[in-house]
């Protein structure tokens, strides 16, 4: 019996994996064979019953003429035998038609049940769930026929839709992050401009600003306006923060130091916090860097430190082994244990921070831009209290970049 069962399962599996055309042909052949055998069996049974009944009465009438013999026997038959004879005659006459109809219906039902019902139900349910934007399912039908391949194609489509849906969601999140990043980047130049405007409004009407100082202040304001314009142009051309290109150019350490001093001077005194700038580089050192990225990262780090500092912020610059290192230290409370792990993540803000003016994305911007410039961003707490944020930028020529 076990051998027979294994053979049956084997043939059933072959039939399930057969193509729809081959399976239909097999069902038709099996149905036609079964129908033919059923007809033959019914014909045989009907004729046998007829012979038994007729033979019972024929033994009582030994006549040579068939017609009188038939009428004599039919007239002498019991009522029950007559009914049986009529039924057998009807079945014998109509069994081919009835069996063919029954065979067609049975083959259709079995073919639909075995080859179409399950995959159609799977596809219908899958289409309904996709229509409801539910992609967390699997469209699986274990067969090698056309319906199995169709379900497999449907499953691939579901996976592609899920991937596209995830990509679209990531793009939306990235666009949101990018918008917040630019809003964050715009705030520092605007703060600097506001500081210059306050300075001019306070001292210019009284004549306490020399012409040289006025021109210097206007020049610095012009640089901030150019920076704002650059931010706007970048926002038009860059679709994601990670796509921002690094354009290294040769810059002397004296030039980048002067740029940093101007930036720190503009922010010095903001919120009552003093900024100390210390450059430990030889002034003739040639560096290859993207000045805009270095300034943007430094601005963001300074903004973060000024938000927490009590009285002072110290900025130190040096060049070590092909990297420009910028350290920003403050006398604030430092990072919490969670902050040390999460501060460079987008949208992270300390639980104790009540201010809603920033989006918790400044250090994330610095982290991404430092990596794109071949460097890194690190955050620490000083042993004497306060936070230390270090940003490094690879400043050797591209053909000599450290791998």
Image: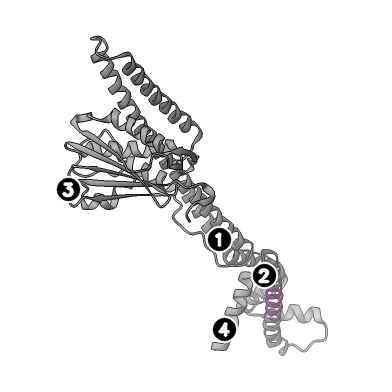
Give the vertical position of 19 relative to 56 (above or below). Answer: above
Cα distance in 3D space between marks 1 and 4: 25 Å
Q: For the residues carrying marks 2 and 3, which lies nearer the camera in this image?
A: 3
* Foreground residue among 347 and 37: 347
Asked if the stretch drawn in magenta spans residue 33, the answer is yes
Q: For the residues carrying marks 2 and 1, which lies nearer the camera in this image?
A: 1
| Residue under pointer 3 | 385
Name the image quarter holding residue 302: top left
Q: Secondary structure at mark 2?
A: helix
Q: Secondary structure at mark 1?
A: helix
Cα distance in 3D space between marks 4 and 3: 78 Å
Q: Earlier in the sequence, mark 2 or mark 3?
A: 2
Q: Secondary structure at mark 3?
A: loop
Q: Residues within 10 Å of mark 3 (few under 14, many from 20)?
A: some
| Residue under pointer 4 | 6
Q: Earlier in the sequence, mark 2 or mark 1?
A: 2
| Residue under pointer 1 | 119
Q: Residue 152 at x, y = what percent?
A: 57, 60
| Callout count | 4
* Foreground residue among 263 and 158: 263
């Amino acid at each position: 019996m076990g051998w027979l069962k294994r053979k049956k399962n084997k043939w059933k599996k072959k039939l399930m994996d057969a193509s729809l055309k081959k399976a239909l042909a097999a069902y038709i052949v099996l149905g036609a064979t079964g129908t033919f055998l059923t007809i033959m069996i019914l014909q045989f049974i009907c004729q046998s019953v007829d012979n038994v009944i007729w033979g019972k009465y024929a033994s009582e009438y030994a006549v040579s003429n068939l017609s009188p013999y038939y009428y004599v026997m039919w007239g002498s038959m019991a009522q029950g035998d007559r009914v049986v004879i009529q039924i057998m005659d009807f079945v014998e006459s109509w069994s081919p038609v009835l069996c063919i109809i029954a065979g067609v219906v049975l083959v259709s039902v079995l073919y639909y049940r075995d080859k179409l019902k399950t995959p159609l139900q799977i596809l219908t349910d899958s289409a309904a769930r996709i229509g409801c934007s539910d992609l967390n399912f699997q469209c699986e039908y274990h067969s090698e026929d056309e319906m199995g391949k169709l379900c497999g194609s449907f499953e691939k489509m579901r996976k592609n839709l899920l991937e596209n849906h995830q990509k679209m969601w990531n793009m939306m999140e990235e666009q949101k992050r990018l918008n917040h990043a630019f809003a964050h980047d715009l705030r520092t130049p605007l703060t600097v401009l506001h500081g210059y405007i306050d300075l001019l409004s306070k001292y210019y009407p009284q004549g306490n600003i020399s012409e040289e100082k006025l021109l210097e202040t206007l020049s610095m304001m012009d640089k901030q306006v150019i920076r704002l314009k650059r931010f706007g142009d970048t926002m038009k051309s860059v679709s994601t923060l990670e796509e921002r290109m690094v354009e290294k150019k040769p810059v002397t350490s004296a030039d980048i130091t002067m740029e940093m001093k101007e930036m720190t001077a503009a922010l010095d005194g903001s919120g009552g916090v003093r900024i100390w700038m210390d450059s430990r580089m030889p002034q003739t050192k040639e560096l290859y860097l993207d000045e805009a990225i270095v300034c943007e990262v430094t601005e963001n780090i300074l903004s973060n430190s000024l938000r927490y500092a009590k009285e002072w912020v110290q900025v130190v610059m040096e060049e070590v082994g092909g990297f420009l290192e910028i350290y920003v230290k403050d006398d604030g409370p430092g990072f919490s244990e969670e902050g040390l792990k999460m501060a460079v993540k987008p949208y992270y803000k300390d639980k104790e921070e009540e201010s809603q003016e920033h989006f918790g994305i400044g250090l994330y911007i610095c982290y991404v831009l430092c990596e794109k410039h071949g460097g890194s961003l690190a955050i620490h707490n000083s042993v004497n209290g306060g936070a230390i944020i270090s940003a490094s930028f690879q400043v050797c020529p591209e053909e000599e970049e450290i791998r």
